[in-house]
Amino acid sequence: MKFVDDYRDPTRLKTQLAELRKLITRRWVIMDVCGGQTHGLLRHGLEQALEDVLELVHGPGCPVCVTPAEAIDDAVELAKRPDVVMTSFGDMLRVPGRRGSLLQARARGSDIRIVYSPADAVQLAVKEPAKHVVFFAVGFESTAPATALAVLQARQLGLTNFSLLANHVRVEPAMRAVMQLPGNRIEGMLAAGHVCTVTGFAHYSAFVDQFRVPVVVTGFEPMDLLAGLTGCVRLLESGEPQLCNEYSRSVRPKGNVHAQRLIDEVYCVATVPWRGFREIVDGGLVIRPALRDFDARSRFGLAASLFSSDGDCQSGDVMTGRIKPIECPLFGNPCTPDNPVGAPMVSSEGACSAYYRYARPIEVRT
Amino acid sequence: MSDLSRQNDGPGCPILSEDDGERITLAYGEGGRLSRRLIRERMLTRFSNDELNSLGDAAFLTPESRQLAFSTDGYTVTPLFFPGGDIGKLAVFGTTNDLSVSGAIPRWLSLSLIIEEGLPWSVLDRVLDSIQSASAIANVTIVTGDTKVVPRGAADKLFITTSGVGEVIEPSPPGARSLQPDDVLIVSGPIGSHGAAILCAREKFDFDPLPISDCAAISQPLISLYLARFTPRAVRDATRGGVAAVLHEWADASGLTCIINESAIPVTDCVRGICELLGLDPLNFANEGTFVLATPSELVESTLEILRKHSVTNQANVIGRVKPRRDNPVLVVRGIGREVVLDEPSGSPLPRIC
């Protein structure tokens, strides 16, 4: 556990926290883009320790949260077919669509199984040739190489009973969408370290030039998060909107070229619906036409939804920093992790779930 | 036995998908000659005692103490065998541990099996052997039992129910309602091992090393504590929902707040690593031989001294304190010393996406 303990050492954390507080002269508004960072900040008490001096806004970087309800409806519908085994990561099962969640569909008799890797879904297709195995693929560029590899494996094995219900999304276009919103208050961004491990970060130079805000590539352990925040505050205080990498133990400027090639081989960039945004230009990855046999939407004739409808959930306002999760009128009543109105309350990466778990205000405590 | 089994051994029989020997058929649960043969050959040979051997409809118990404790639990774990244990060991220790944490010495056990048609005899024998050795370790006698065989699909391989009766040592722990501010919270050993072991076995995760379930009898250290009159306010084995669920129950029952210190909680590197990888918290993982105990602060040293003498609790540690009610029922002090809310576990832990 060396690689965890080194980045959680209380003495080092306290020193770094004190240094950061000394740097701050005004209450900057900084967005951590990734849900893993949101949870890290709240779980380790960093946000609570900084709330008097910094405003942290939790961005649209939770893949489960931004998956449109319509995509979950598609998965629920497909799973009703007796010949289909629907597979997904556990996180996805509790997220409500408009007609319930996959967990509820499973209770009604659909064959829905949790897998830990898309490759496990391919193996399932090998083992159960009479069934069609669909992998419900969500996630950013950090997850897309693994689902791309699953498609390529299935093709190599000559499988005709495996496909993806793909809802992959891209981080940078979402960050752009946030910056372009009317009334945007974000002054600095922490970029998601694991996505940059795949994509690299050189492409953020154009983002920094366009929006004149610092972007700091940041990891997930408490020391990483403090380093990212410190880097971002330093750039803000000196008035230099620059690009900086505070997660160099994992992230290279050009990223993981092999993983990028896998993504390119299977997916192309497309404008897709996002929960909370209706749609984001170039915000997603769709399966290339040449591989349509592995695209569940094509195989089963599902129409791609054009826009995301969010019902009563204010996830868009939460993920763009217009409101804090606790300012949503549904927070805690009726929206709780056991009875979620929207995905950010149920996903383990969701901002609402992070506040509910680690920073719930007194009036909504049970 | 073999006559009937052979009828099912023919080609095309759906039961024999794997070559692991002869299978149990429905006839063994139908109460006639074959049922009696199963009991005689497989149960009485292992669990022989006067009460059981009489094959009566009820067992007669002769307690020495004024008060008895009575507990029951059903066991449906999949897979049946996992690193550190199996369903049989679990069925004995799970129920005897419930008696132990309630202040009783486990004495008598009932054993009820629901067997799915087609279970290999070799699997049943392995489980029964395990029940035999676990009963010896927990020092309980199996005095009554029942066996049913149900059609394929009506159960998942093997379900076990055990009920246990124990003799209460007075004074017994008064329970969570008696918690007082400044009481000390102790955990008896590394947490989360059972939940992690089952998860890895079920999902065939290939971690090296694999986590090993803590499945064990906790009666010895607890009986030592009770007999030494270091009676805790409350003891609870932290099974489903883990330590987090116990602390929430105690906070609710007492109207107080439990505050624990993350760095004081024993967790093996292996379990921590798995939790980090999957985005799960060992505080929510099940245990099967690890308990949480609350005791007045003046009893902490003597309590730890006794617990640490027993191998099953030799890593016992103080993890926190009970405090007057705060805004939240359970708080964890993490890294930088901030108190962070510990949410009550809900449903089984589902791993995250990225």
Image (cartoon, helix red, strand yellow):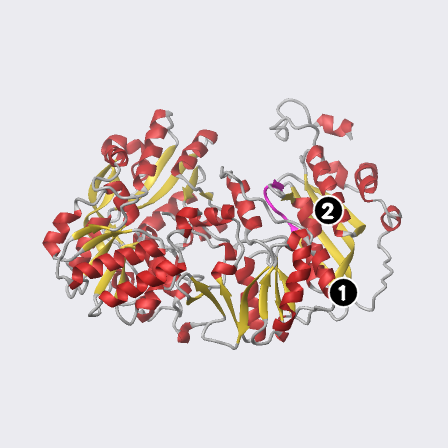
Residue B115 x, y percent position in the rendering: 69, 42
Q: Which residue is mark 1?
A: B227
- Per the picture, the main secondary structure of the magenta-coloured stretch is loop
Q: What's the residue type where badge 2 is placed?
A: Ala
Residue B134, numbered label: 2
| Magenta region | B75-82
Residue B5, numbered label: none
- Mark found first going from the N terminus, 1 or 2: 2
Examine the rendering and report whether any part of residue A138 can be seen. Answer: yes
- Which of the pair B195/A73 is nearer the observer? B195
Chain ID at mark 1: B
At a point 36% along the width and 53% down the height, the residue shown is A221
> In the drawing, does residue B103 fall left or right of residue A244?
right
Residue A110 x, y percent position in the rendering: 46, 45
Residue B354 x, y percent position in the rendering: 36, 47
- Which of the pair A301/B320 is nearer the observer? B320
Q: Secondary structure at mark 2?
A: helix
At a point 55% along the width and 72% down the height, the residue shown is B322
Q: Vertically, is A253 above or below B139?
A: above
Task: Rate crowding at label 1 as few (under 14), some (14 to 19) or many (20 or more) other CA atoms within 10 Å.
Answer: few
Residue B64 x, y percent position in the rendering: 86, 63
Examine the rendering and report whether any part of residue A140 can be seen. Answer: no
Q: What's the residue type where badge 1 is placed?
A: Leu
Q: Residue furthest top?
A: B11
Q: Vertically, is B67 above or below A13?
A: below
> In the drawing, does residue B245 fall left or right of residue A123?
right
- Which of the pair B224/A179 is nearer the observer? B224
Chain ID at mark 2: B
Q: Secondary structure at mark 1?
A: helix
